[in-house]
Structure formats: structure tokens, C-alpha cells
């Protein structure tokens, strides 16, 4: 794996039983998320040990999949750290990059080899584009129907409180037999922090969607044969402030619309620190991340856009 940032190391262990998915009514403040990712853009590459390790594991999965896409989209590309990896694996493909934070895309631009803008102009409906990257919400991609062979999305889904609209949009833009490959965080993520913080009103730690609910949403969006699995990774820190610094640097701190604006005063904060300190092992504090990886294919449609059944006829084999 890539070298972790100072103060971190990464280890894997067996996954515990799953937890319930995020409760109905949970919502994220998208405007706040965008502002945080904008502020995080200059610093997040120094706090992305987890994302680099997950990208490596996603890439390993492609070793076992036969795929030669003409166009590849890195959806939620951030600063574009996965683009060199994708370019190496698919040297003949046109790489596209999308993120909802302009400052992230500005840094991703430097990682993209200059390519002609003609193809991208056609894909996004004739609007001029100097490079194959664009600001876009995952739920409303400015791309033509069936224009992509692969959509790659590394840890973008935690920024969505409902994945279904994004899944439908990925399905729309993929060609038949195109592949959607993604990673995200499950409900056991940051469980130590969740347990240590005061259990008062409001969402103190971001909620994450259960693997089985993600699988159901993929099928509902029209994908076939989704493959999902989960494992736990643990980052360790010298102190709790190191964890908070990484969350801020990556833009990943809590953005729930019901988040409290304080921590019940100094007493609550000191109690939370003391509770977390009791978890120290071998001089380090753990922070668990439930990593969900999945992929699914876009099958040939069974009905037309207006609901009529599609019948496919195969040539009769020659008589023997």
C-alpha cells in the first residue's frame, strides 16, 4: 500500500456482524459538504492514506475482469489521485473526471494528460470543454446516454444520503455491458468515535449505508448481478486530535443536517476524550473504517423507454 501520512498506520482484521442501515430521515447538508471539500482541496492529499489503500484494492479486482472501455469516468474524483492508476490500466481509453467541488477539479486537471476536447464536447451536448473534467453532481451527470464503458467511484458515496438517484444516473450513462465499480463506507465506520461522544440530540457522527441496502439500490436502478463485500480497516493515531485533523483535511467531518453545534461544553468534551483514551492499545488509538466494495454490470434492456417489451431473435442454427 501507499505510505500512510505521518501518525497513521493501516491494518486489516475480520469484519464484525453488520449493523442497521442509516435511519429514514437522515440527511446531509450538501452545501456544507461542497464548502468543506472546497476548503480541503489544498490539503486532502496529505490525509488520504485510506483512499489510496482502497484504490489499490479496487484496482486489484480489475485484474479478474475482462474490460476494454473506450471511455472511463472517475466519479467523485477529488484531486484526481486515481487518474494515473486508471490511465495505466486503460491506456487506450479516454479518461473523464467529475466532482461537485471546483477546487478539487482544479487540482485534478494537473493529473490529466492533455486530450482533445472534441469528444467531451459531444458527450456534454456541444458545450465547449478545454479538458475532460467537469463539475457535476453524481445525481445529474452532463453526459449522454450510454456514453461510458466504466464508471469508477472511490469513496464518493458517503457524500450522499440516498445512493439510488446516483445509481440510476450511472446506469443511464453506461453502455450495455458497461461496469460500475465503487467503494464506500459502511455503518461500522468510526464506531469508536460514535461510542465515545455524548449520546445527546443530533447526529454527532456521519451515518453510512449498509451493504445490503446498497445492493438493493443497485438492482432497483437496473443493474444486474451486483457483487458486494466488506472488510474492516483500522487507522491508528497517536492522539484523538490526529483523527480530527484527518477528517477535517479530507472534508470528511460530520455534515448531517441534524448535527449539533457544540459538544455539551468542556465537561462533555473531556469525557469523550477520556472514553476514547481507554481504547489505546500499544500506544495508539484505533479508528475503524468499514470498507464496502462493489461492482455491477448494465444489462441489455428488457423494455423500451415507454414500457414495451423488447424481443430478441437469434438466427436458427443450420440443419445438420
Image (tube, rainbow, N blue to C red):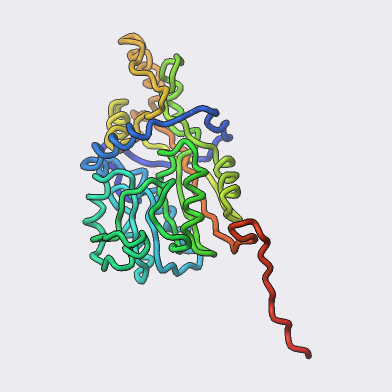
Quadrant of the frame with the C terminus:
bottom right
Residue under the image location 66 percent in, 65 percent down: 310
Question: Is 19 on the left or on the right of 252, as rendered?
Answer: right
8 lies left or right of 233: left
The residue positioned 26% from the left and 39% from the top of the image is: 38
Is 51 drawn above or below residue 257 in the view shown?
below
Question: Is residue 49 toward the left or the right of residue 279 in the image?
Answer: left
Q: How many marks?
A: 0
In the rendered structure, the answer to whether residue 117 lies left or right of residue 203 reads left
Relative vertical location of residue 313 with respect to residue 173 in this rendering, above or below: below
**Residue at 46% over, 22% down:** 195
Residue reaching furthest to the bottom: 320
Comparing 239 with 222, the one in front is 222
Identify the residue at horizontal 42%, vertical 55% (top origin).
152
- Front residue of 242/281: it is 242
Q: x, y (%) of residue 150?
A: 45, 61
Q: Position of residue 301 (x, y in %)?
A: 60, 61
Residue ranking furthest to the front: 306
Q: Which of the two residues, 234 or 95, is positioned nearer the viewer here?
A: 95
Q: Position of residue 153 (x, y in %)?
A: 42, 51
Relative to 186, does residue 153 appear above or below in the rendering?
below
Q: Nearer the viewer, residue 75 or 240?
A: 75
Which residue is the extreme one toward the right? Answer: 320
Residue 317 rendering spot, x and y as whole percentages? 73, 84
Amino acid at each position: 500500500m501507499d505510505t500512510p501520512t505521518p501518525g497513521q498506520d493501516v491494518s486489516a482484521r475480520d469484519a464484525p456482524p453488520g449493523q442497521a442501515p442509516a435511519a429514514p430521515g437522515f440527511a446531509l447538508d450538501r452545501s456544507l459538504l461542497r464548502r468543506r471539500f472546497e476548503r480541503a482541496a489544498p490539503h486532502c492529499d496529505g490525509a488520504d492514506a485510506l483512499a489510496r489503500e482502497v484504490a489499490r484494492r479496487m484496482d486489484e479486482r480489475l485484474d479478474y475482469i475482462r474490460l476494454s472501455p473506450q471511455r472511463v469516468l472517475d466519479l467523485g474524483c477529488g484531486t484526481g489521485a486515481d487518474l494515473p492508476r486508471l490511465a495505466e490500466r486503460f491506456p487506450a481509453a479516454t479518461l473523464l473526471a467529475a466532482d461537485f467541488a471546483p477546487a478539487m477539479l482544479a487540482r485534478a486537471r494537473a493529473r490529466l494528460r492533455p486530450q482533445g476536447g472534441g469528444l467531451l464536447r459531444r458527450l456534454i451536448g456541444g458545450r465547449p470543454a478545454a479538458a475532460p473534467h467537469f463539475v457535476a453532481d453524481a445525481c445529474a451527470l452532463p453526459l449522454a446516454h450510454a456514453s461510458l464503458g466504466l464508471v469508477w467511484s472511490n469513496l464518493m458515496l458517503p457524500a450522499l444520503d440516498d445512493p439510488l438517484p446516483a445509481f440510476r444516473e450511472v446506469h443511464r450513462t453506461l453502455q450495455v455491458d458497461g461496469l460500475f465499480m465503487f467503494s464506500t463506507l459502511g455503518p461500522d465506520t468510526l464506531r469508536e468515535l460514535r461510542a465515545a461522544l455524548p449520546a445527546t440530540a443530533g447526529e454527532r457522527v456521519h451515518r453510512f449505508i449498509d451493504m445490503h441496502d446498497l445492493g438493493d439500490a443497485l438492482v432497483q436502478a437496473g443493474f444486474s448481478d451486483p457483487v458486494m463485500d466488506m472488510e474492516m480497516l483500522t487507522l491508528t493515531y497517536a492522539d484523538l486530535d490526529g483523527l480530527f485533523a484527518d477528517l477535517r483535511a479530507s472534508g470528511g467531518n460530520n455534515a448531517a443536517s441534524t448535527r449539533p453545534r457544540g459538544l455539551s461544553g468542556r465537561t462533555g468534551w473531556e469525557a469523550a476524550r477520556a472514553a476514547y483514551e481507554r481504547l489505546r492499545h500499544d500506544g495508539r488509538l484505533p479508528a475503524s473504517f468499514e470498507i464496502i466494495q462493489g461492482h455491477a454490470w448494465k444489462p441489455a434492456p428488457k423494455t423500451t423507454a415507454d414500457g414495451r417489451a423488447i424481443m430478441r431473435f437469434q438466427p436458427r442454427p443450420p440443419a445438420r
